[in-house]
Every structure is written in structure tokens, then in C-alpha cells.
Amino acid sequence: MEGYNLHPDLIQAVDRILLPQEKIQARIEQLGREISADYSGKSPILVGLLRGGICFFSDLLQAISLPVEIDFLSVSSYSPEMQEIGYVRLMKDLELSISDRHVIFVKDIIDTGLTLNYLLRTLKTRKPASLEVCVLLNKEKRRLIDLPLRYVGFEIPDYYVVGYGLDYQEKYRNLPFIGMLKAEMMRNNH
Ligand code: 5GP
């Protein structure tokens, strides 16, 4: 982790860097070009999910050369003890109408797929002209539900990752790379 000017607590929590900053940026540039070509002549709405998705959303937005609009959703999953599997509560709804609009749902990471499944079902009831998903990280191995992912940044193994917006108990979002969190950090509940 040389070259990064980070507090020792942040450096110590990371086992290793899975995706360095340059690799993330290069892939997002490609995704932006691909989306700009696919939606040429259209003006899609990018829908982001707060809060883990903000870094990816912001960089992807700037990599798209079309006229776009943006809006955000926020959800909260119930704690695992209370959770009816896949049940997600909408905490903040969209402000724009997506009816008859081309919507690209932008998400940081897909794990079991349950959150995305719930959100796609909700968005579809509003009758968008089209609805596609752009996800930065895909943990295919943990998928419980088959989901149509139009744009995928990286396939990653089944590790808990932090950084570039992704947290563990609200920490580590500001790491400028995506790193694997040390197992003991999760056990210690820091
Ligand atoms: P799902 O299992 O429904 O696909 O993902 C639920 C949520 O769990 C994601 O939106 C994300 O917030 C969180 N999540 C899943 N895997 C990871 C991970 O490796 N790191 C972090 N920070 N969050 C994750």
C-alpha cells in the first residue's frame, strides 16, 4: 500500500488491494464509452443507490458523453435476525418520474442479488421505456437470483471488499482503491 497517504488504521484494516485506483478508472472510462454508444440519440436517467455507490456513480457520470439526468434511491435492509430474506425498505425515493424514460440503474456491488431484485421490481412498476443495470463489482458465486446485468465492471471473488465508497460499519469508504478487508477486522467489530 505504498504511495497512498492514509491513516495507519485504514492501512492496517486491508489485507490486500484487489483493484487499484488506475484499474477502476480505466474500466469506468470503457463503461462510459460503451453506454454513450449504446444510448446514442437518447437521454437516459442514471439512478444511483446511496451511499456505497456514490464514488462509482460520480466517476461513471463524468465518463458518459450524452445528456443525462440523475436521481438517487436509498434503502435499508433489516438486520439479519429480523430479516425476511431479501426484504429491503425504501428510505429515499426518486424525485424524477421515470415513466417512458430510459433508465440505467447504477450500483456498486451485487452479492446475493436480493437488493437489486427488489429495486428492479419497484422501478419496473413505474413503466420506464427501458431499464438496464450497470454494476461495478459482481460476486457471481454468491448469487441467489438470476438478474440481467447489462454492464459489469469487474467479476470479483467472494471476499468482503471495502473502499471506493464501500464500507464496513460505515468505515473505509474513503479508501481510493477497492481492498479486501482483513477477516479479524470483521470479527473484532471495530
Ligand atoms: P445483495 O446481497 O442484495 O446483492 O447486496 C446487498 C448489499 O450488501 C449491497 O448493496 C452492498 O451494500 C452490500 N455488500 C455486499 N457485498 C459487499 C462487500 O463485499 N462489501 C461491502 N462493503 N458491501 C457489500
Image (cartoon, rainbow, N blue to C red):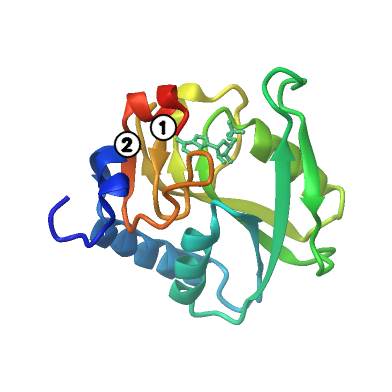
Q: Nearer the viewer, residue 28 or 14?
A: 14
> Mark 1 = which residue?
160
Residue type, label 1: Tyr
Label 2: state its secondary structure: strand
- Which residue corresponds to the image point at 69% horizontal and 54% vertical from the top-left? 131
> Mark 2 = which residue?
180
Residues marked 1 and 2 touching at CB (< 8 Å): yes
Query: Is the residue indicated by label 1 positioned so its CB lies within 8 Å of ligand 1?
Result: yes
Query: Is the residue indicated by label 2 positioned so its CB lies within 8 Å of ligand 1?
Result: no
Q: Sort mark 2 into few (<14), some (14-19) or many (20+) by Cα contacts within 10 Å.
A: some
Label 1: state its secondary structure: loop
User: Residue 63 location in percent, x, y?
Assistant: 44, 73
Residue type, label 2: Met
Q: Nearer the viewer, residue 106 or 19?
A: 19
Q: Nearer the viewer, residue 133 or 15?
A: 15
Specify whether 163 is left or right of 16: right
Label disc, if present, on residue 125 of the rendered structure: none
User: Residue 129 location in percent, x, y?
Assistant: 77, 61
Q: Indicate the quadrant of ligand 1 in the picture.
A: top right
Specify whether 182 is left or right of 127: left
